[in-house]
Each structure stands twice: as structure tokens, then as C-alpha cells.
Amino acid sequence: MARNKTVSDLSQLEAMFAVALRDTINNEVFEVIRDELIMEMERRVYDVYEPKRYQRRGSSGGLKDPDNYVITMPYISDKKMSFLIANLTKGNGDTLDDFINDLIEGVDGFAGDPSLGMPARPYTEYAYSNLISSVSRNDMLEALYKGLRKRGFNVSVK
């Protein structure tokens, strides 16, 4: 949106703001959320367990690879917005067709199976908790404000 642009009615302004908001969520806000997920993953997955049956790919095609994270197009209705962020990393070796997240975080995969010596290592719930109630929340809000400002909307919350 160009600076000092005039609009003919509120619906036009609302449509322009929705475009700016979606673009900001898809870019600046997504990066903050993705980085928080990766940080919690390092702390709760990588730092607590060293695999014996496979080699980790890390940030080169593995669970920590930022390129393996995707976001759905944000859906905006009334006063709510929703979107989904997923890590699409597939396993290697015996788990080639499985999403690694399902295997690591839950007990339905190999994580949590005592016979394999691998505890379940959930991390997403901790990352989202941080995004709601800690310093990461401020990072996410700052990304939202900066992204909207970059697109011509100077927003502040009181």
C-alpha cells in the first residue's frame, strides 16, 4: 500500500488491510514462529538424544531445515484469523514415508517405545507456549507491527 493512499470506502480499506495482514503473517510472523519451533526442537530433541540407528540431517533436509516448514494461507473472518504451520520433513531409512514430527513427538511412532530406548520428545507445545506467554510473544508482535508498517499500515495496540 502506498503511503497516504486514499480509499473510497471502508470495505476497500478492509480489503487492503487483509492483503497486508496475510502477507505479513506469511513472511515476518511465520519466520518468528518457525525459528521458535527450531529453537525448542534443538533443546528438546537434538540436545537430549543421539540416534544410533540413523544419521540426522539437521538443517540440511532434516527436521531443523527451515525450508521444510510451510504455512497455509491465513484465513481471516470477522475478528479471527487462523493458519497452520507444519514441518514436512520425512524420515529416512525405515521411516522414509513417515513425517518425522509424528515419530518424534508421539508414542505412536518410534518415540516413546521403551524397547527402542527413545523417549517421546514433544517440542511444539513448548514452542507455542513460548509464543503465547514469553519473550517470543513480543518478537511475534514486533514482526506483525513491522510487517504491517512495511506495507503502509502504522499499527499500535493499547
Image: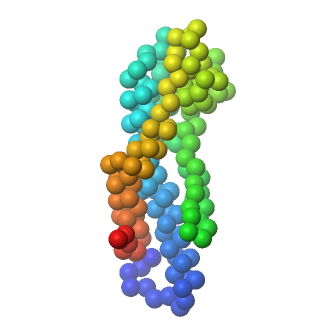
> Which residue is depicted at the point 58% across and 37% down?
88
Task: Tell me if residue 93 can be seen.
Answer: no
Q: Is residue 124 above or below residue 117?
A: below
Q: Which residue is at the front of the view, 21 or 60?
A: 21
Quadrant of the drawing holding the N terminus: bottom left
Q: Which residue is at the front of the view, 49 or 96?
A: 49
> How did the renderer colour the structure?
rainbow
Examine the image and state in which quarter residue 34 appears: top left
> Which residue is depicted at the point 56% across and 42% down?
86
Residue occupying the far bottom of the picture: 8
Q: Position of residue 43 (x, y in %)?
A: 38, 29
Task: Tell me if residue 117 can be seen.
Answer: yes
Q: Which residue is at the front of the view, 58 or 116?
A: 116
Q: Is residue 57 left or right of residue 89?
A: left
Q: Position of residue 7 (x, y in %)?
A: 50, 88
Residue occupying the far right of the picture: 97
Q: Position of residue 39 (x, y in %)?
A: 38, 36
Q: Is residue 121 above or below residue 38?
A: above
> Which residue is depicted at the point 54% across and 85% down?
10
Quadrant of the drawing holding the C terminus: bottom left
